[in-house]
Amino acid sequence: MASQNEGLKIGDVVKYEQDPTFSRETLVILDGETIVVGEALKNNGSDKYVATAAADAEVIALEAASPSGADGAAVCLVRNAVVDSANVTVASGTVADLAAALAVVNATSGFGRIIVRTGPTYTTL
């Protein structure tokens, strides 16, 4: 029997957000980029976003995009949210690098933070 692999969904990446109308924005994706849900992106200097290493991350893609012939658009997580580190994709680097980069971006932007959660913490009773 044939099997089918399903890609990540927004709920796999975003574990909490205060208000989707505030925490998400539609951003321009540079022509030729292939973006997947949960991928870390950065502004290339001309207000177009590209996949990036963890240490340079600014936002997290919430939809796939693969523009060809012209720049495309994708909804991205830009503020006030918690993401699951297991489902965030970076070109290179570690989860700690990603968390540090997002903390710097959020501190300088004046908006709330995107927090990278590394998993649930349990305590014994």
Image (cartoon, grey):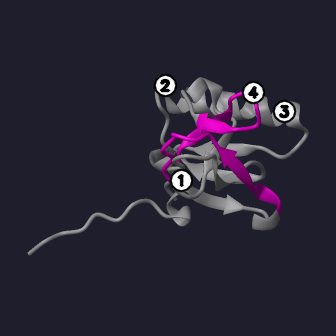
Q: Amino acid at mark 3?
A: Ala
Answer left or right for 6 relative to 30: left
Circle 1 residue: 65
Circle 2 residue: 93
Residue pictured at 18% horizontal, 69% vertical? 3
Circle 4 residue: 45
Tags 2 and 3 in contact by the CB under 8 Å rule? Answer: no
Circle 3 residue: 107
Identify the mark nearer the N-term, 3 or 4.
Answer: 4
Tags 1 and 4 in contact by the CB under 8 Å rule? Answer: no
Q: Nearer the viewer, residue 12 or 69?
A: 69
Residue depth check, mark 1 versus mark 3: number of the one nearer the observer: 1
Identify the mark nearer the N-term, 4 or 2.
Answer: 4
Instruction: Identify whether 96 is placed above or below 84.
Output: above
Q: Amino acid at mark 1?
A: Ala
Identify the mark nearer the N-term, 1 or 3.
Answer: 1
Region rendered in magenta = 22-50
Q: CA distance from mark 3 to mark 4?
A: 19 Å
Q: Amino acid at mark 2?
A: Gly
Answer left or right for 120 relative to 81: left
Image quarter hosting the N terminus: bottom left
Residue pictured at 66% horizontal, 39% vertical? 49
Within 10 Å of disc 4 (Cα), the crowding (few <14, some 14-19, many 20+) is few
Q: Element at badge 2?
A: loop
